[in-house]
Image (cartoon, rainbow, N blue to C red):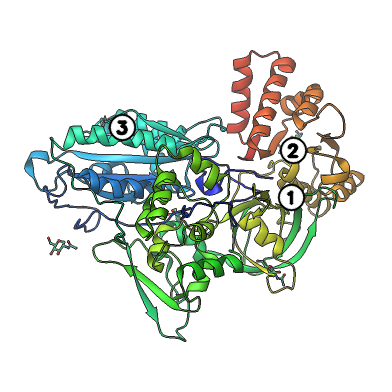
Amino acid sequence: MLVALVDSMMEQFSVSYITVLATGCVTALTLAGLLYVKQESQNRQSLTGNATESGSEKKVSIDKTKFPGGHITIYYATQTGTAESFAQQLEREGVEQGFHIHVEDMDETCLEQLTAHSAFGDNDDDLGTSRAIILAATYGEGEPTDNSTEMVNEIKESLEDESKMTVLEGLEYCVFGLGNRQYEHYNAMGKFFDSSLETFGAKRIIPIGMGDDDNDLEGDFESWKDQMWVELRKRYCRGAALPVKKDNDEFKIPDCEYKIQYHSAGTPAEKYIGLDKVHGSSKPYFTSVDCPVLTSRELRSSEDGGSTVHMEIDIANKLEYQTADNLGVLPLNDDAIVASVAKSLGYDLNAVFSLSAAGNHEWHGAPFPMPISIRECLTRYLDLTSAPRRSDLKHLIHYAKDPIDRKALQRLSSKEGKKEYKEKIMDGYVGMVDLLKLCPSLSIPLEHLISVCHFLLPRFYTIASSSLEFPNQVHLTVSVTQAKRKDGSTFNGVCSTHLADAKPTSANGTVRVFSRPSTFRLPENSSKPIIMIGPGTGIAPMRALLQERRYQRDVQKKSIGPNILYFGCKKRSLDYLYRDELEAMQKDNVLDNLHLAFSREEKQKVYVQHLLTNNAQDTWEMVDKKGASIYVCGGVRMGHDVTEALTDIAVSQGSMSAQQAKDYMAKLASDGRFVQELWA
Ligand SMILES: *[C@@H]1O[C@H](CO)[C@@H](O)[C@H](O)[C@H]1NC(C)=O
Ligand SMILES: *[C@@H]1O[C@H](CO)[C@@H](O)[C@H](O)[C@H]1NC(C)=O
Ligand SMILES: *[C@@H]1O[C@H](CO)[C@@H](O)[C@H](O)[C@H]1NC(C)=O
Ligand SMILES: *[C@H]1O[C@H](CO)[C@@H](O)[C@H](O)[C@H]1NC(C)=O
């Protein structure tokens, strides 16, 4: 079951993925060409040249013949790296358009710094104007990405402060938002930046662009940025000619941000690197820990066809967590995939190397522990199986020696080739490993591959155990992702496959993980009721909450309120996850009401939201009179249906208008009594 698109492309996604997927291997492409994938890109180059920077006062002295348009700063707020890789794309294009570009993480700036980079440095005529392009992803239910939270809070505070209303005078800006229409607060952050900057006196250059990851995020971005360059050139380049463009038809390896140094055999790998010397989004690579797997068992029946695995992981003395937090898991590429890439590109997997910044490029911190072997680098850090974006294919053209491969890449990365791209690359699950086979003339030096390839991102799972009952263990409910390609081969999700392969005491028996807080917290007053809605793998945090309530009752001797669970799946006999445990909890009076929705048992498909509606009166009584908290975990569409069912209950049972009911639900959410973890 494919749960998401290639997940590297998802920016607006919810706090937890229980099911993960994202990679491609074999392929059915027959053209001589089509190569190269790029995914969770973490290229972090500054291609545009020679900005002399020191500290926060970035005085830039700009060569007007090379950069007639002057300086522009691009700020990105990213969760999965998509906004960052869009920023890098604009950085590359900026030079071609005659602009001097600097890219910054939103994390590293503050409101007043937005006007710190002036357009022509010391040139008097333009002193005082600055330009910013903002690329802002929205996370989950309208939230900022982790790393723009501080900036967003600062803006919110400043919006209350009359004296701040002119702080951004002299700034000209435009905003592109990355979101997903499946979520209610579509592109909330893009809109937030777009309107607040204007409030502070900045001038908008073109209307906000919004990308929809549920449809064609990259296409949305492309249309917006094309319009943006036209407008920027009109405004700032005063008729200066475009710099001469490099010809794609020539085999000429582009500039690379990294310089590589190979070490002699026997160099110890992974010297300690302080976290302050690490690239922002690479921190999990340095902070996660290897933990042994204690248990791994299948939860579905053998007739089901699919697989959901229950895992127990030993975290003693390594990790701490709270009930229903998220566990970040660092996936691994399969040995065969690593070997295939090395073979295609002629790498020696045992060679050990380090990276540093090349020439005039800035160093943004270590992308992974170094020195490192090529094997380890390809296994742990590069995403070799997710589909590359069209812009990645375009960049790869430079590395293809054969004109036929170049032509194929050109076609697939062009606007006209969008349909073929979707068919051949996206739907064919073609990743870097496949692309290298399809375009055998691709020749990519390792440091270029690292710069061009997306990085393997941690996948997040909602923890299915109570930290009170299991302080030394984390339990997971892992839905294993597989998809069939048209040619009959199988695509395996990189992380869930890795987890499913991690059998206790085997050579693969450890997983590299870290924990992250979630919003699922039990009510402080344990006597209050809870209503849990978690179909499919959405059961995970509910299992944790039930364990915790049992612990509160049996060990802490607290009184606990009613526990009500809605679970849904296809059939009782196929994929009724944790049936034994749930039935035992019922007998033990921990689980007071268990409502089961089976979508394939009767002609009429029954889903959890139908059962909620059937129980409208009881549900309303629990929520409105008894102060129940509601927890929802599962797919976004289910989440919307459940929210709608609850809103309708407020209308019918609480005699509210539609608007009053919506406000009621919003109030529950802001009071922390209606919590959702949804994934696309
Ligand atoms: C380890 O995992 C690989 C796939 O990554 C699998 O092919 C192999 O069989 C596993 N080995 C053991 C001992 O389970
Ligand atoms: C950067 O600028 C300095 C001073 O203008 C110059 O000496 C140096 O060669 C430049 N570096 C590059 C890589 O262009
Ligand atoms: C806890 O909730 C119960 C049930 O609603 C209520 O009777 C009790 O007063 C609450 N206790 C506190 C400390 O609020
Ligand atoms: C975001 O910023 C925080 C705090 O500065 C840092 O710890 C974290 O690693 C950063 N994460 C990413 C993805 O850049």
Decide: few, some or many residues near mark 3? Use Cα within 10 Å; few <14, some 14-19, many ≥20: few
Question: Residue 170, can we see it?
Answer: no
Question: The residue under label 1 is which amino acid type?
Answer: Ala
Give how far across and how far down residue 273 sits, in percent: 43, 71
Tell me which corner region of the image, top left, top right, bottom left or bottom right, holds residue 631: top right
The residue tagged with tag 1: helix, strand or loop?
helix
Earlier sequence position, callout 3 versus callout 2: 3
Q: Nearer the viewer, residue 234 or 488?
A: 488
Question: The residue under label 2 is which amino acid type?
Answer: Met
Q: How far apart are the alpha carbons under marks 3 and 1?
A: 49 Å
Give how far across and how far down residue 408 sits, in percent: 43, 49
Residue where numbered disc 3 is placed: 227
Q: Residue at x 25, y 33 (%)?
A: 230
Q: Nearer the viewer, residue 81 or 127?
A: 81
Observer-side mark, 3 or 2, equals 3
The residue tagged with tag 3: helix, strand or loop?
helix
Residue where numbered disc 2 is placed: 532
Question: The residue under label 3 is which amino acid type?
Answer: Gln
Q: Residue at x 60, y 40 (%)?
A: 680
Observer-side mark, 3 or 1, equals 3
Residue where numbered disc 1 is placed: 544
Q: Is 590 drawn above or below residue 334 in the view shown?
A: above
Q: Residue at x 77, y 64 (%)?
A: 295
Q: Going by the image, does 1 lie left or right of 277?
A: right
Q: Is 11 drawn above or below residue 356 in the view shown?
A: above
Tell me which corner region of the image, top left, top right, bottom left or bottom right, holds residue 642: top right
